[in-house]
Amino acid sequence: MATAVVFIVLIASAFGVFYLYFSTRHRERMGLIEKGVDASLFSNSKATKSYRQKVSSFRFSLKSGTLIIGTGVGLIISFLLYHWIGPMGYNGIEALYITGVIFVFGGLGLVLGYYMGRKLDKEDSKD
């Protein structure tokens, strides 16, 4: 019985995500068209598609790279803190400190990637 409920919730969640994605995209496009934006923006020409793929793959690489670098820096700093400070004497608490430092630096890596992507967007809009 519990697996059926989980399966139903999973299917309903997937449907909800797709519905929200397509309805939001439709509303956004209709709003742009009402404001007088050229409809060629929505075309699926090969030039537009290849440019989008190139930019999206570059941005994904940028975000993934900054996340991995941030996680690596977090691992190194947590390792150094553990060896400089030493065990705290509590059972399992060290793992929480280490994990916390890793997540903090991973998050900082994502924030750095966001600002780098925003800077690239500004440079693209100038061209």
Image (tube, rainbow, N blue to C red):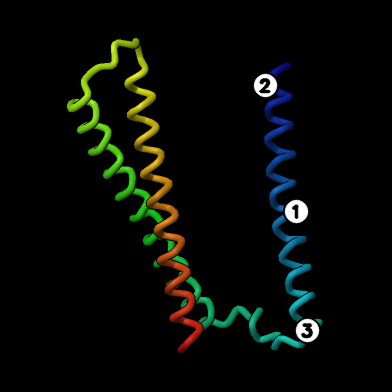
Contact (Cβ within 8 Å) of mark 1 with mark 3: no
Q: Which mark is residue 35?
A: 3
Q: CA distance from mark 3 to mark 2?
A: 48 Å
User: Which numbered mark, 3 or 2, is in the foreground of this view?
Assistant: 3
| Left or right: 21 in relation to 78 | right
Splitting the image into 4 quarters, where does residue 62 fall?
bottom left
Label 1 environment density (alpha carbons within 10 Å; few <14, some 14–19, many ≥20): few
* Image coords of residue 40 (percent x, y): 66, 86
- Circle 3 — which element? loop
For image coordinates 20% across by 33% down, the residue present is 80
- Where residue 93 appears, as percent x and y from the top left, is 36, 18
Please give the label number shown on residue 19. 1
Tell which tag, 2 or 1, sits nearer the viewer: 1
Identify which amino acid the numbered label 2 is placed on.
Thr
Binning the other alpha carbons within 10 Å of mark 3 as few (below 14), some (14 to 19) or many (20 upward) gives: few
The answer to whether residue 81 is left or right of residue 49 is left
The CA distance from mark 2 to mark 1 is 24 Å
Q: Quadrant of the N terminus?
A: top right
Mark 2 vs 1, N-terminal side: 2
The three-letter amino acid code for the residue at tag 3 is: Lys
Question: Quick one: label 3 or label 2, which is nearer the N terminus?
Answer: 2
**In this figure, which residue is indicated by the disc labeled 2?**
3
Residue at 79% in and 75% down = 30
Which element carries disc 1, helix, strand or loop? helix
**Which residue type does callout 1 highlight?**
Tyr
Determine whether 61 is above or below 12 in the image: below
Residue at 48% in and 75% down:
121
